[in-house]
Image (cartoon, coloured by chain):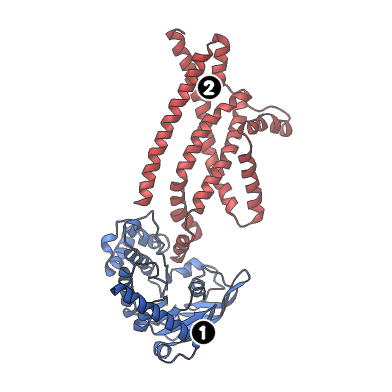
Amino acid sequence: MTVEQFFGNLSLLALALLKYNVTLTVLAIILAFPIASLLALGRLSSHRVICYPVAAYINVLRSSPLLMVLFWTYYTFPMLLKGGNVNVFTAALIGLTAFEAAYFAEFIRAGLQSIGKDQQKAALATGLRPWQVSLYITWPQAVRRMLPSLLTQSIIAFQDSTLASVIGLREVVQTTTIVNAREVRPIWLYSMLAIFYLCLCFSLSRIVRRLERKTADLLNA
Amino acid sequence: MEITGREPIVEFRQLGLWYGGYQALAGISERIHSKDCVVICGPSGSGKSSLLRCVNGLERFQEGDVIVRGISVRGCQDLPKLRYHVGLVFQRFELYPHMTCLSNVTLALRKVLRLSRAEAERRAKEVLDRFGVIDQADKYPAQLSGGQQQRIAICRSLVLEPDVMMFDEPTSALDPEMIDDVLEVLLQLVREGMTMLIVTHEMQFARDVATRIIFMEKGRIVEHGSKEEFFSSTRNPRTQAFLDRVFKEKRAEEAHRRA
């Protein structure tokens, strides 16, 4: 591979990564968090009409491979609902969002439940309303506790975004395969891909770990 | 609402509480007047804590009623508005760990009473100073000893100027050295004329400070009366057995500490 080709391919991969994988992951996370919060609250609800369907959703999506979920959102559901096709990126986004929301919901639920009931009762005893207790007491502490799990799951989501290649999204893995079909340099190309992902995910993990330490200090003062 | 001193501040009327099929409280009727210092004692599981929590509606009881400042808790549509008039201090302090001690105390002032931050802090610091914990204002609860934390917890309720303060075993989670600190605070409150409802095992404290004593067992009031009646002429054998046991334990503890 000439130097020109190397940098040419590198920029091609980087572009695909930013345009699709990064965008897909970031959007999915931004959408998944509020949805997951609602799911978590629904899961904790005392009304069976709410908590049973929500629990069903969470369990089904956590028991299914993301690949299958992507097939559903790209092939199955559009055919059943519209009788036609959907945009690949949209399908990938819906699939990844729905998938991650189920995982986030469990982390959020665990975080909320980890806040002592008596502490919340003490807050109510001072005249605070339930929504105020949630806002000032429960959620601030719960978010700090669930942050490590949520961030780790987000990094996994970033890695999983590569699965969208299977439904035809021109993201980084798909782009590598296309370039390889043209130049037939699998070792070079797939190694570049691997190193890309390795550097990125490793740096992200380190940032997460540093954040973990900072929030742990804050909570334990 | 004017408190004339003749109407009870808290009145229990045939109060009954069930947890599923288990009856935690039965037929509780009692009147607590202004400046009363009522100590509630009894074996574990007798419903003492549940009783306190019925007063501010944290426990939703099924039978009877509690009247607080003339307002029925059962029919109350806006419990949060009633709650800050009744202070409740917990056995394990239950301070908010993610806020400074000052913030713990000012939160309700700012969000319930809608005071400005400056006014809330001024009031909070006044109360913290009164009880000797002003130096801990900017620290986090985890940095404080148990006795200090409990005093902050008392300030948190007190700063809302309640008509009655309830204490659910305030010293049970403390090391012996710190129990006296907190009992001193309770004493100070009694001297200042606060109406108090205290669940405690500290019978010596009850002897010194209480005006009335209620003995509970299995969800019922077994015996109640003024302090003098209670300690000198209790006729009920179960009460006597309980007192004997508690004083024996206390004597053993003292002996062990001296040794």
Q: Is residue A169 left or right of residue B131?
A: right
Amino acid carrying label 2: it is Val
Bin the neighbour count of mark 1 within 10 Å (Cα to Cα): few under 14, some 14-19, many 20 and up. Answer: some
Q: Secondary structure at mark 1?
A: strand
* Rendering coords of residue A87 (x, y %): 63, 27
* Rendering coords of residue A136 (x, y %): 44, 55
Q: How far apart in space, not on screen, are marks 1 and 2 (Cα)?
A: 77 Å
Answer whether residue B194 is visible to the viewer in this image: no
Bin the neighbour count of mark 2 within 10 Å (Cα to Cα): few under 14, some 14-19, many 20 and up. Answer: many
Viewer-nearest residue: A160 or A137: A160
The chain that appears blue in the image is: B
* Rendering coords of residue A31 (x, y %): 54, 38
* Rendering coords of residue B83 (x, y %): 46, 69
Q: Residue at x 55, y 21 (%)?
A: A173
Q: Residue at x 55, y 30 (%)?
A: A160
Viewer-nearest residue: B9 or B37: B37
From the viewer's perspective, is residue B80 above or below residue B240? above
**In which quarter of the view is residue B25 placed?**
bottom right
Q: Residue at x 56, y 10 (%)?
A: A182
Q: Secondary structure at mark 2?
A: helix
Q: Is residue B226 left or right of residue A87?
A: left
- Provide the residue designation for mark 1: B222
Amino acid carrying label 1: it is Val
Per the rendering, the mark at residue A172 is 2
The chain that appears red in the image is: A
From the viewer's perspective, is residue A188 above or below residue B75? above
- Specify the subunit that label 2 lies on: A
Q: Residue at x 51, y 78 (%)?
A: B67
Viewer-nearest residue: A207 or A127: A207
- Specify the subunit that label 1 lies on: B
